[in-house]
Structure formats: C-alpha cells, structure tokens
Image (cartoon, rainbow, N blue to C red):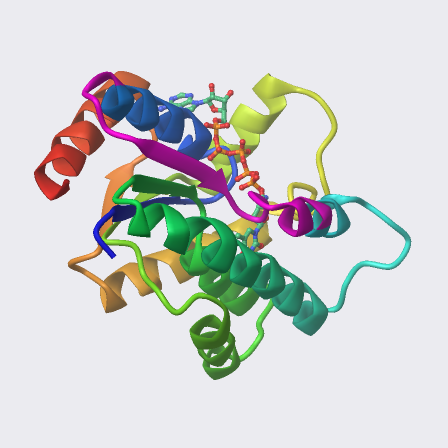
C-alpha cells in the first residue's frame, strides 16, 4: 500500500474535525489527493451504525454491543474505503480510528482491554502512520460544547467523569505507541496546532 494513513483522536470538542479540515485542504492545495473520513461512518453501513450508536433511546447498547457496533463500522470502512484509497496512493485522514475504541469502550466503559485488542485485530488490521492526539481537559470540552449549543447526542451526554476516564485511556495508549501518537495541547490556538500538524504531515508524506 503506497498511500499515507493519518488519524486524529481526542475527547469530544478537542478540535479534531477542525484540524482534519485544515490539514486536508492544506494538502490538497499542495497537489495531494486526500480521502477524509470520520468514524463511525464513511460508508452506507457505517453511517447507519453511527445513527444507531449516537441516538438517544430508551434502551442504550450494553458495552459489548457498543464495542461490536463500532468494530463493524470500522471493518466496513477499512475494506471499502481506507485500503482502496491507500492502494491508489492517496493520503487518508481519519477523524477517529481504533484508538477511540481503546479509550472509550476500554477505559470509558470498562470492557477488558484484551477483548478490545482482539476485536481491534479483527476489525482494523492496520494502523495509522501518525496519530495526533488533541489533549483537552473535560472541563474545557464541556465549555466548548456549551458555547456551541444544540442538542447533545448519546455519547456527548456522558458525564465529565466518563470523559476523564477516556482521556486517561488515550494517554495510556500514547505511552504504548510513542512513535505513532503525538500528544498536542488542544487548548492552543487553532492556527498554531494546524501549523505543527502540517509540518509533520509534509515530512511523513
Ligand atoms: N466513539 C467511540 O465511543 N468509540 C469509537 O471507537 C469511535 C467513536 C470511533 C463520535 O462522535 C462519538 O463516538 C464520539 C466518540 C464515540 N463521542 N463523543 N462524545 P464524533 O467523533 O463524530 O464527534 P465528537 O468527537 O463528539 O466531535 P466534536 O464534538 O465535533 O469534536 P471535535 O471534532 O474534536 O471538535 P471540533 O468540532 O473541531 O471543535 C469543537 C468546537 O471547538 C468548535 O466550536 C470549534 O470551533 C472549537 N475549537 C476547535 N479547536 C479549537 C481551539 N484550538 N481553540 C478553541 N476552540 C476550538
């Protein structure tokens, strides 16, 4: 596979979508072909699973069902979108990937980590070359959500204590993959974060 696989992670409101858009446009301006995808989503099946996972209903999925649904969406995305784009030599940028499952379902929901890793091996099977972890405090995440307004989805409705567990899961994961995962201070300005990311991305491509 000749393309370059990059991803963004962090708790909600950390600025992933903002930075994915900045990076994708900056690379396209330099002549690179970019495929930009979000998780869960990016395929017909994945978008349907996304709705199932994020809508608030009277019966929330149990942690294992939640894990398997995220994994099903990822499996579809890897096979139908990510691998083909990498094969075509494109830059593939993911707004969340398998690190999110480790942090949210592993640390957030408490699913045993060996189960998370087994499912990851089945559903992902590839790793990004570089992951930018936008690290933000749960308090700042809450402030940004409040500022943005609008209704919260099922995952966003979790308490700050849940977000704190997820954040620590991400930081643990970064210790396991120090060469791949770069921790960035997500409270810095959008422009300074974007400049740092673009510099690193251009070195990798
Ligand atoms: N999930 C999971 O549990 N397991 C999995 O395996 C996967 C996902 C893959 C998907 O939501 C949910 O699924 C997510 C994790 C779970 N749940 N939560 N909660 P998503 O990824 O689609 O949505 P999100 O993470 O909640 O997106 P978000 O709230 O839009 O966050 P963001 O993309 O990181 O931030 P943003 O949209 O770029 O920025 C948020 C706001 O902050 C916005 O008003 C910006 O203008 C502002 N912003 C951005 N950067 C800055 C800086 N640097 N300074 C100040 N303000 C900023």
Q: Please provide percent x and percent y for residue 78.
A: 46, 57
Nearer-the-camera pick, 54 or 106 = 54
Q: Quadrant of residue 16?
A: top left
Nearer-the-camera pick, 52 or 88 = 88
Q: Please provide percent x and percent y for residue 72.
A: 61, 64
| Residue at horizontal 21 percent and vertical 51 percent from the top | 2
Q: How many marks?
A: 0
Magenta region includes residue 47: yes
Nearer-the-camera pick, 75 or 179 = 75
Q: Is residue 28 left or right of residue 54?
A: left
Residue range (magenta): 29-48
The outermost residue toward the right is: 58
Q: Is residue 150 above or below residue 61?
A: above
Q: Is residue 203 left or right of residue 21?
A: left
The outermost residue toward the front is: 88
Q: In the rendered image, which quarter contains the N terminus?
A: bottom left
| Residue at horizontal 42 percent and vertical 44 percent from the top | 10
Q: Is residue 98 above or below residue 150?
A: below
Q: Is residue 78 visible?
A: yes
| Residue at horizontal 44 percent and vertical 53 percent from the top | 97
| Residue at horizontal 52 percent and vertical 25 percent from the top | 144
Q: Is residue 104 visible?
A: no
Q: Please provide percent x and percent y for residue 47.
A: 66, 44
Q: Please provide percent x and percent y for residue 104.
A: 53, 59
Q: In the rendered image, which quarter contains the C terminus?
A: top left
Q: Is residue 21 above or below residue 38?
A: above
Magenta region includes residue 171: no
Q: Quadrant of residue 92?
A: top left
């Amino acid at each position: 596979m000749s393309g370059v696989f990059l991803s963004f992670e962090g708790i909600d409101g950390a600025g992933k979508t903002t930075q994915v858009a900045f990076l994708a446009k900056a690379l396209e301006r330099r002549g690179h072909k970019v495929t930009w995808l979000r998780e869960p989503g990016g395929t017909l099946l994945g978008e349907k699973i996304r709705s199932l996972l994020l809508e608030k209903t009277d019966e929330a999925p149990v942690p294992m069902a939640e894990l398997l649904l995220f994994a099903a969406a990822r499996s579809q995305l890897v096979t139908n979108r990510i691998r083909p784009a990498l094969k075509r030599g494109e830059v593939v940028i993911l707004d969340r990937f398998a690190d999110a499952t480790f942090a949210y379902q592993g640390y957030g929901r408490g699913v045993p980590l060996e189960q998370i890793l087994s499912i990851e091996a089945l559903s992902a099977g590839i790793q990004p070359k570089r992951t930018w972890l936008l690290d933000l405090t749960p308090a700042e995440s809450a402030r940004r959500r409040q500022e943005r307004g609008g209704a919260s989805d099922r995952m966003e409705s979790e308490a700050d204590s849940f977000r704190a567990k997820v954040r620590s899961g991400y930081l643990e994961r970064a210790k396991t993959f120090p060469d791949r995962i770069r921790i960035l201070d997500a409270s810095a300005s959008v422009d300074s974060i974007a400049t740092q990311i673009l510099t690193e991305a251009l070195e990798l491509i």
